[in-house]
Image: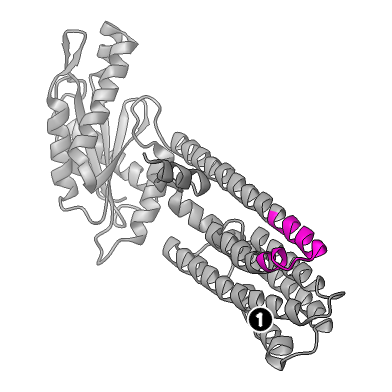
Amino acid sequence: MTLAQALKDWLWPRVPAQVAEAYVLAQYERLRGMAPMLYIAIVLIIAGAIAGSPQGPVWIRLGVPALVVTICVTRMIVWLRRPPGLPTVDKARSMVLRGQVISALTAIPCSLWCLNSWALADPDRAIYFPLYMAMGTLSTAYCLSMLRGAATFHLAVGLGPIAMAMLLSGDRMAISAAASIIVTSGFLFALLRFQHDRFVELLVLQQRMVALSQTDPLTGLANRRALQDRLEKSVGHARGGHGPSVLLLDLDGFKPVNDRHGHAAGDEVLRQVAQRLSDVTGTDGIASRIGGDEFAVLVLPGSQRSPEAIGTGLLAALALPFEFEGHRLHVGASLGIAVWPDDGTTLDQLLRVADRALYRAKGASGDEAAPYGVHALRRAEAS
């Protein structure tokens, strides 16, 4: 990594890809909460500034402030009328980007107005206009703290030109005020960066906690809660009657493995079962462990294979022996299928129907306890 790249990453750290969507939604939520208050504050500051505006061209004294006030009031109404709740990530990203563009377009005329007003004002009143600009810009940058680009742009464009003009004015008071503005802006930028780092860390931690709450600790597969969430999401993507399916698997002959070889062997068999389920399922579904030696596979609506084809592949994969410390262990499986919405619309309903199908499959095999058997799968009729 070059020095320039390292400096860039330090000044402007990237948002990790795994929390990028959550970060966008957080930006939108913060903007929705702060935008109305920000616009009210800007209007009040501008109203006070207009009262002390010097004589000069009308477009400077009244035109630019009127334009900014119109934008602020319009955007405040837009934000107040937005429905509660979070939009989709794409919509949130679009609205955040629009807010950044509008804030940037507002900062430019405000900066020009401040420069012109400061230059035209009487010496004893000129200092008030940088003060107005500093209050408005710092307030805006704080409210837009989740939008680093917009906040930094406001600091640079809103305060940079007037601070530079004051430094070059030769007036000691103006130079002192400009130095204070620059130092305060630097502190705020550092605060924005610190807040960004802490917030990203919080998002990453939250993501890890969610992953832990939805993952089976032994096998690494999804757990029942995650299966429920994925079912609800997949139902929303069902088209033309092709909905998700649930395949319920129960291992046969697993207890003798624990009894003869110990729980370490049983845990290893469960991990290998999980790996085989994931390999066979691929991108067509979600493999999960829902408890003990019971597993379930959610076949997604867009699967290129039928639930029966996937089920046959799962049973064939589990018929192969498992390896543990030089021992070849044999564990069979039985499987039942339930299809949404014919067999149920909730996970509990689908699992109950699949469970009945599974035990009918066991009964059809004629030997429920056969440790090496692969019992024929059978779809249950909803009842």
Residue type for callout 1: Val
User: Does 177 appear in magenta?
Assistant: yes
Quarter of the figure that contains the N terminus? top left
* Residue bearing mark 1: 68
User: Observer-nearest residue: 120 or 377?
Assistant: 120
Q: Secondary structure at mark 1?
A: helix
Q: How many marks?
A: 1
What percent of the width, then of the height, locates residue 50?
A: 79, 83
User: Does 12 appear in magenta?
Assistant: no
Q: Residue at x 53, y 44 (%)?
A: 200
What percent of the width, then of the height, locates residue 86?
A: 53, 62
Per the picture, the main secondary structure of the magenta-coloured stretch is helix
From this viewpoint, is residue 76 visible? no
Q: Residue at x 73, y 56 (%)?
A: 179
User: Observer-nearest residue: 363 or 315?
Assistant: 315
Determine whether 61 is above or below 286 in the image: below
In the image, 15: left or right of 358?
Answer: right
Q: Residue furthest right?
A: 124
User: Observer-nearest residue: 184 or 150?
Assistant: 184
In the image, 383: left or right of 182?
Answer: left
Residues in magenta, as a range: 163-182
Q: Residue at x 63, y 62 (%)?
A: 155
User: Observer-nearest residue: 192 or 108?
Assistant: 108
Determine whether 327 is above or below 112 in the image: above
What percent of the width, then of the height, locates residue 284?
A: 22, 48
How packed mark 1 is, by other alpha carbons closer than 10 Å (few <14, some 14-19, many 20 or more), is many
Q: Quadrant of residue 151?
A: bottom right
Determine whether 218 is above or below 2 in the image: above
From this viewpoint, is residue 313 visible? yes
